[in-house]
Amino acid sequence: DVIYFWKQIGRLSIGLVIPIAFGIGLNMLCYDTSILIYLLKILLYVIVYVFSMWFIGMNDHEKNLLLRFCSKYRKVQGL
């Protein structure tokens, strides 16, 4: 279904706009060249990206695939 496909692309795009805007804002507010600040900005960006993709960008099927993968990974690692 072509309409469903483009709706999913739209959701994915919205899910990407939030972390991109956050990253640009973070770089504008915090311009420091130390490696610690750089790593902290990376960590914050990844957190925003993951939450944005989980709540906006991913559909239920994709979420279930990721959850199954994490479950299998934990079993292999013995966690």
Image (tube, grey):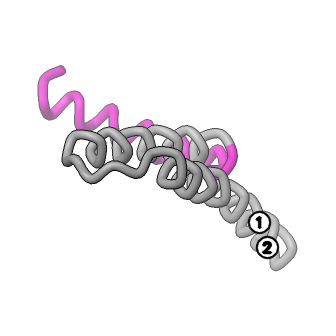
Image height of 62 relative to 8, above or below: above
Residue at x-position 58% and y-position 59%: 20
Residue contact at pointers 2 and 1, CB within 8 angstroms: yes
Residue at x-position 26% and y-position 44%: 39
Q: Distance between the residues labelled 2 and 1?
A: 6 Å
Q: Which amino acid does label 2 sit on?
A: Trp
SS at mark 2?
A: helix
Q: Is residue 64 magenta?
A: yes
Residue at x-position 32% and y-position 39%: 40
Residue 23 as seen in the image, left or right of residue 7: left
Image height of 10 relative to 23, above or below: below
Q: Name the residue under label 2.
A: 6
Q: Which residue lies furthest to the top in this view?
A: 79
Q: Give the range drawn in magenta.
A: 56-79
Q: Name the residue under label 1.
A: 10
Give the camera-side residue of 22 and 63.
22
Q: Does the magenta stretch include residue 49?
A: no
Q: Position of residue 25 (x, y in %)?
A: 58, 51
Q: Where is residue 67 in the image (x, y as percent from the top left)?
A: 44, 37
Q: Where is residue 35 in the image (x, y as percent from the top left)?
A: 19, 47
